Image: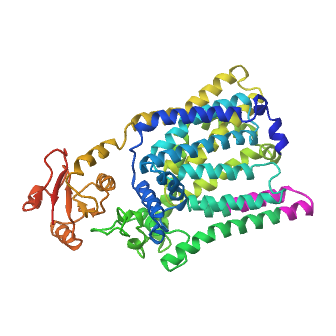
């Protein structure tokens, strides 16, 4: 297989010349844009940073967490160790993951046997796409994309499972992907087993089939060992067997009557910023069961259908041109089983998208969940374009179509990069003013606006216990006393009104805009 790759036309211009140039352009643009996105912040990002800081301080018991995925925090530790500011470190980590993704994309162009011009166009389009992914949100999905493409490099080989190491490598990558995001574990077992089964039934001869079975068992066993180590650790902490503890939270959110914590909740450990670092305990036992009744099951089916429609819409919006190419190719070429065999990589890609997006459709739909599939979608569209040109379509306009295809992928990423310019900087600047009035470590709460309050708490280094959005005045007063809250943040849109805080000392000097700060203790 290596010889086939080396002979591929893309390699004739020099080993790795194309991807290294693209990586250089990507990292240069990323470095120039970094100052304008370094303050981007989100609740999950605060959790990953907080856990990484715990590992750095040696607080291993509190760092072990079944709700948050560990890999991103582990990789943040070296960056924090050399005193890189945490929010900046998350962006650097995402950019480095993007460089790995570009290399994997290049190697996958050989799996799809793309023409050199098509590969160049798609890699160029991938640069702004990955910059958008890197700066949009702090999430493990960027890392998972890099790991998943590595896995696809193995299973998309024409001689997959005919080398005894393939199964072990897949299992190792699958285990690492689980540590990156727990969703990959059930996907891996379904996808890897199906890939091996398809390979088994497409091969003749007992020797080849036995080797495929060995690979399948080796892959499953290796993944079990790698994932089992972390499963054992978090299970020991929580006192029951678990591979992840997001389930109760997710099902509470998607239930017919979404459950949100009423009242305040203390952070799960002494150095956590909020309950969101590990909300599994408060949600324990209150998760929704879609099989509890026929009405619940019917509602869940509606959720699944809605998620499928939304995922389809996300693919279409990402590139309508790519969707037209893929559909046109599919209906033009697939008439017999031989046609499917001739375009096996495209078929395997379709199966991958259906399994991966279908798994998420059972729960939630979000653009970032589909990032690995978007990049696979790019390769598929390039393959479809090449096949259509090879069959005599668009012969005179092939180069123009490649340019149009590439541009279609970058429209939304460039638009979103522009719209998120300096995102998070306003709350960072506000925290500099608030820092004069609230000492680090003070217990704080807010009347409304959980997200802005949480982000402010992160910058202040102060734990936040919740907001009073869903509380009456008496309940809010009780919660403030119960947890001995030091300061309350009152935002301009407060429905409680200033009269509720009469008698408490306002400590800000009216220099914090719509935010008013009252000292309660």
Position of the N terminus by quadrant: top right
Whether residue 321 is visible to the viewer of this picture, yes or no, is no
Q: Could you say which quadrant of the image residue 504 lies in?
A: bottom left
| Residue farthest front in this picture | 82
Q: Position of residue 46 (x, y in %)?
A: 40, 56
Whether residue 108 is visible to the viewer of this picture, yes or no, is yes
Foreground pick, 148 / 27: 27
Would you say residue 264 sits in the magenta stretch? no
Would you say residue 191 sits in the magenta stretch? yes
| Residue farthest bottom in this picture | 239
Q: Position of residue 107 (x, y in %)?
A: 71, 41
Task: Name which residue lies at 56% across and 62% down.
Answer: 182
Judging from the image, the colouring scheme is rainbow
Question: Height in image: 116 above or below 164?
Answer: above
Task: Name which residue lies at 75% across and 62% down.
Answer: 168
Position of the C terminus by quadrant: bottom left
Q: Which residues are magenta?
A: 190-211
| Residue farthest left in this picture | 503
Direction from residue 85 to residue 427 in the image, left or right: left
Q: Position of residue 71 (x, y in %)?
A: 55, 59
Q: Could you say which quadrant of the image residue 479 lies in?
A: bottom left
Task: Name which residue lies at 74% across and 57% down.
Answer: 195
Question: Height in image: 162 above or below 88?
Answer: below
Would you say the magenta stretch is mainly helix, strand or loop? helix
Q: Position of residue 274 (x, y in %)?
A: 35, 63
């Amino acid at each position: 297989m290596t010889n086939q790759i080396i002979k591929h036309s893309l390699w004739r211009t020099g080993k790795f010349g194309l991807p290294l140039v693209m990586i250089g352009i990507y990292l240069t643009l990323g470095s120039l844009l970094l100052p304008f996105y370094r303050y981007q912040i989100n609740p999950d990002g605060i959790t990953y940073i907080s856990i990484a800081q715990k590992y750095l301080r040696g607080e291993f018991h509190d760092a072990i967490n079944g709700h948050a995925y560990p890999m991103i925090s582990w990789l943040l530790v070296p960056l924090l160790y050399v005193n890189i500011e945490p929010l900046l470190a998350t962006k650097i980590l995402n950019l480095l993951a993007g460089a790995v993704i570009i290399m994997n994309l290049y190697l996958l162009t050989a799996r799809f046997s793309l023409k050199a011009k098509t590969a160049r166009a798609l890699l160029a389009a991938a640069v702004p796409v990955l910059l958008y992914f890197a700066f949009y949100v702090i999430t493990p999905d960027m890392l998972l994309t890099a790991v998943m493409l590595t896995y696809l490099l193995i299973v998309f080989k024409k001689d997959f499972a005919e080398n005894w190491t393939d199964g072990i490598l897949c299992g190792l990558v699958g285990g690492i992907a689980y540590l990156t995001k727990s969703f990959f574990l059930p996907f891996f077992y379904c996808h890897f087993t199906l890939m091996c089964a398809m390979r088994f039934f497409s091969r003749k001869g007992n020797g080849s089939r036995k080797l495929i079975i060995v690979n399948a068992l080796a892959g499953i066993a290796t993944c079990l060992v790698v994932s089992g180590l972390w499963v054992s650790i978090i299970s020991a902490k929580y006192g029951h067997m678990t591979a992840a503890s997001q389930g109760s939270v997710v099902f509470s959110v998607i239930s017919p009557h979404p459950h949100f914590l009423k009242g305040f909740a203390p952070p799960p450990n002494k150095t956590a910023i909020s309950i969101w670092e590990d909300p599994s305990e408060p949600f324990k036992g209150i998760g929704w069961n879609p099989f509890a009744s026929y009405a619940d099951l019917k509602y869940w089916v509606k959720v699944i259908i809605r998620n499928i429609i939304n995922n389809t819409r996300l693919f279409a919006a990402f590139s309508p041109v790519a969707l037209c190419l893929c559909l046109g190719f599919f209906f033009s070429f697939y008439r017999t089983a031989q046609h499917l065999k001739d375009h096996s990589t495209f078929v395997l890609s379709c199966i991958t998208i259906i399994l991966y997006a279908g798994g998420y459709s059972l729960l939630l739909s979000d653009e970032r969940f589909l990032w690995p599939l978007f990049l696979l979608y790019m390769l598929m569209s390039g393959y479809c374009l090449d096949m259509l040109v090879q069959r005599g379509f668009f012969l005179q306009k092939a180069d123009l179509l490649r340019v149009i295809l590439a541009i279609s992928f970058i429209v939304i990423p460039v638009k979103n990069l522009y719209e998120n310019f300096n995102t998070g900087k306003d709350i960072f600047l506000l925290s500099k003013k608030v820092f004069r009035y609230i000492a680090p470590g003070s217990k704080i709460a807010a009347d409304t606006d959980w997200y802005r309050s949480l982000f402010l708490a992160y910058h202040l280094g102060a734990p936040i216990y919740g907001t009073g959005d869903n509380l009456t005045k008496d309940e809010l007063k009780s919660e403030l006393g119960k947890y001995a809250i030091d300061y309350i943040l009152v935002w301009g849109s407060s429905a409680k009104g200033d009269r509720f805080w009469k008698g408490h000392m306002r400590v800000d000097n009216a220099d914090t805009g719509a935010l008013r700060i009252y000292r309660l203790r």
